[in-house]
């Protein structure tokens, strides 16, 4: 299959936990021959460094802006390098306005199922039930929305910021990638 050609050097993928950002980032980068950057990975590493869960790190970041600066400070270094990126981040669309900005939505029940079944998410809060995970996902999202409004003046749930919005609840990763590539051409 030939490598698709799009007019953007950077694609930013935003969305709630469990929406498929990391999976889609990797697949798009593979299809396009782009590099990847994931703030989710960065956040999990920082949480690990502090010996806390990602939810606990969110609560620390509510009062310590250095956490967000550590996570988000890399974006300016990615622009103008001549490299092409697919970025998995809640805020990259804000820091890289010239990117093709994608928001992935997902039903919270499906998001909880995905997070619970993802063995890579070792820094997430451990839950006994999907309902507990749904509550944690809602709490974490509310924390992020409020913090980003306070810190950066941007509402990550305002869909007018994005070039494309895709509901991933009932779509395969291949279908989602096809939708993004078609829209980015």
Image (cartoon, grey):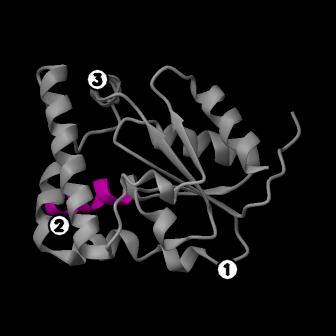
Residue 26 location (% of width, % of height)? 58, 43
- Name the N-terminal-most of marks 2 and 1: 2
* Outermost residue to the front: 160
Instruction: Give the number of the mark in front: 3 or 1.
Output: 3
Residue 120 location (% of width, % of height)? 35, 37
Residue 41 location (% of width, % of height)? 38, 53
Q: CA distance from mark 2 to mark 3?
A: 26 Å
- Name the N-terminal-most of marks 2 and 3: 2
Q: Secondary structure at mark 3?
A: helix
Residue toward you, 131 or 31: 131
Residue sitting at x 80%, y 53% = 6
Which mark, residue 80?
A: 1
Instruction: Give the number of the mark in front: 2 or 3.
Output: 3
Which mark, residue 109?
A: 3
Q: Quadrant of the N terminus?
A: top right
44 falls in the magenta region: yes
Residue designated by label 2:
61
Residue sitting at x 34%, y 41% = 17
Residue sitting at x 32%, y 74% = 152
Which stretch appears magenta? 42-51
């Amino acid at each position: 299959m030939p490598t698709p050609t799009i007019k953007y050097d950077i694609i930013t993928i935003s969305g709630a936990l469990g929406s498929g950002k990391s999976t889609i980032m990797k697949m798009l980068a593979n299809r396009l021959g782009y590099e990847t950057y994931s703030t989710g990975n960065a956040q999990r590493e920082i949480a690990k460094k502090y010996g806390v869960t990602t939810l606990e790190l969110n609560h620390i970041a509510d009062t310590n802006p250095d956490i967000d600066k550590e996570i988000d400070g890399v974006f300016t270094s990615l622009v103008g390098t001549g490299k092409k990126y697919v970025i998995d981040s809640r805020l990259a669309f804000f820091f890289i306005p010239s990117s093709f900005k994608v928001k992935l939505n997902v039903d919270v029940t499906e998001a909880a199922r995905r997070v619970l079944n993802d063995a890579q998410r070792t820094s997430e809060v451990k839950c006994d039930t999907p309902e507990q995970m749904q509550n944690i996902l809602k709490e974490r999202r509310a924390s992020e929305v409020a913090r980003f409004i306070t810190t950066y003046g941007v509402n990550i749930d305002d869909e007018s910021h994005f070039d494309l919005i895709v509901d991933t609840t009932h779509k395969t990763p291949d279908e989602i990638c096809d939708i993004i590539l078609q829209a980015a051409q």
